[in-house]
Image: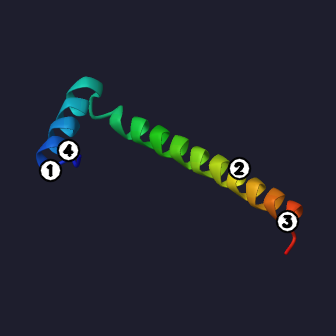
Amino acid sequence: MSMGVGSIVLIAVAALLIFGPKKLPELGRAAGDTLKEFKHATKGLADDEDKSAENKDPK
């Protein structure tokens, strides 16, 4: 299921109408920060799993 250009434009217009032009950059920044923190946290979990697997089976 992919989103076309029309769908993206419709979502952008709806967000603009709901939140207003001054609030959208703040919401985008908050969403970006949240994704960055999530990515950082999951990378740390994946690194911990790799280290524990290496300690159990040192080949």
Left or right: 29 as drawn, with respect to 55: left
Residue 7, given in percent of the width and then of the height, sits at: 16, 42
Q: Residue furthest top?
A: 18
| Between marks 4 and 3 in the image, the one whose residue lies nearer the viewer | 3
Mark positioned earlier in the residue sequence (3 or 2):
2
Q: Secondary structure at mark 1?
A: helix
Q: Secondary structure at mark 3?
A: loop
Cα–Cα span, label 2 and label 1: 35 Å
Mark positioned earlier in the residue sequence (4 or 3):
4
What residue does disc 2 label? Answer: 45
- Which labelled disc corresponds to residue 57? 3
Classify 10 Å Cα crowding around label 1: few (below 14), some (14-19), many (20 and above): few
Q: Residue at x 25, y 24 (%)?
A: 18
| Between marks 4 and 2 in the image, the one whose residue lies nearer the viewer | 2
Q: Quadrant of residue 20?
A: top left
CB atoms at circles 4 and 2 under 8 Å apart?
no
What residue does disc 1 label? Answer: 5
Location of residue 52 with respect to 25 vertically, above or below: below
Residue 54, given in percent of the width and then of the height, sits at: 82, 65
Judging depth in this view, the residue of 10 and 24 nearest the camera is 10
Classify 10 Å Cα crowding around label 3: few (below 14), some (14-19), many (20 and above): few
What residue does disc 4 label? Answer: 8
What colour scheme governs how the chains and residues are painted in the rendered image of this protein? rainbow
Q: Looking at numbered disc 4 in the image, what kind of residue is underneath it?
A: Ile
Q: Secondary structure at mark 2?
A: helix
CB atoms at circles 4 and 3 under 8 Å apart?
no
Q: Looking at numbered disc 2 in the image, what kind of residue is underneath it?
A: Leu
Cα–Cα span, label 4 and label 3: 48 Å
